[in-house]
Amino acid sequence: MTTPMTAQRRARLIAAGDLDGVRAEVEDAPRLGSAIDAASAAYLRDVDRLAGALDDGVAPTGAAGRALNAATGAGRGELVQLMLGAGAEVDRRDPDTGPAPVHAAVAAGTGGDSPDVVRALPGTGADVDATTSDRASALGATD
């Protein structure tokens, strides 16, 4: 089981965009490898692990819904489609700061599948006018 401290450390590494750090944590703690949550799998761009978590019954909502934010922020269309197909909440906001997946997708810039993800989100029902807790729009994420 992942301890709260490990979860907090992983969250800090993810927030910092430290892909190597997240990978190292997983490799250095094999016991935790099987406990990778859906958001970490999405951040690590691990389609198989994310699909496995969903197949094992991990609901793509609630805390696991962070995976959609991670996938949109990484500009990974395949992961986004996997999460949306499993019923992820397209407008799930970060509980602390309020960004929705549309904010993460726009902030990801033009790398990977980001432009396609940004174009696809409105068709999934995403609120393109969503604002964060400090009233920033997705358009503001381009600054």
Image (cartoon, rainbow, N blue to C red):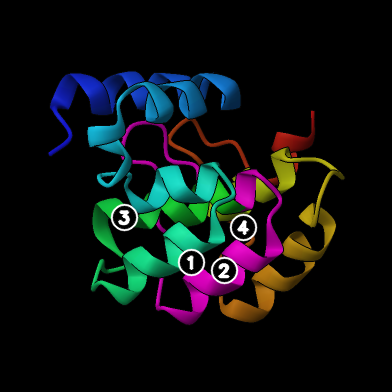
User: Is 54 covered by the magenta stretch?
Assistant: no
Which residue is identified by label 2? Answer: 126
What element does badge 1 sit on?
Answer: loop
At label 3, the amino acid type is: Ala
Report, in whole angstroms, how far the alpha carbon at label 3 lies from the one at label 2: 18 Å
Report, in whole angstroms, how far the alpha carbon at label 2 lies from the one at label 1: 6 Å
Q: Magenta part mainly helix, strand or loop?
A: loop
- Looking at marks 2 and 1 on the same chain, the residue that comes earlier in the sequence is marked by 1
Occupied quadrant, residue 92: bottom left
Say which residue appears at 71% left-offset and 36% top-offset.
140
Circles 2, 1 touching at the beta carbon (< 8 Å):
yes
Mark 3 surroundings within 10 Å by alpha-carbon count, few (fewer than 14), some (14 through 19), many (20 or more): many
Which residue is identified by label 1? Answer: 90
Disc nearest the viewer among 3 and 2: 3
- Looking at marks 4 and 3 on the same chain, the residue that comes earlier in the sequence is marked by 3
Residue 87 seen anywhere in this rendered image of the structure? yes
Which residue is identified by label 4? Answer: 129
Report, in whole angstroms, how far the alpha carbon at label 1 lies from the one at label 4: 13 Å
Say which residue appears at 30% left-offset and 25% top-offset.
29
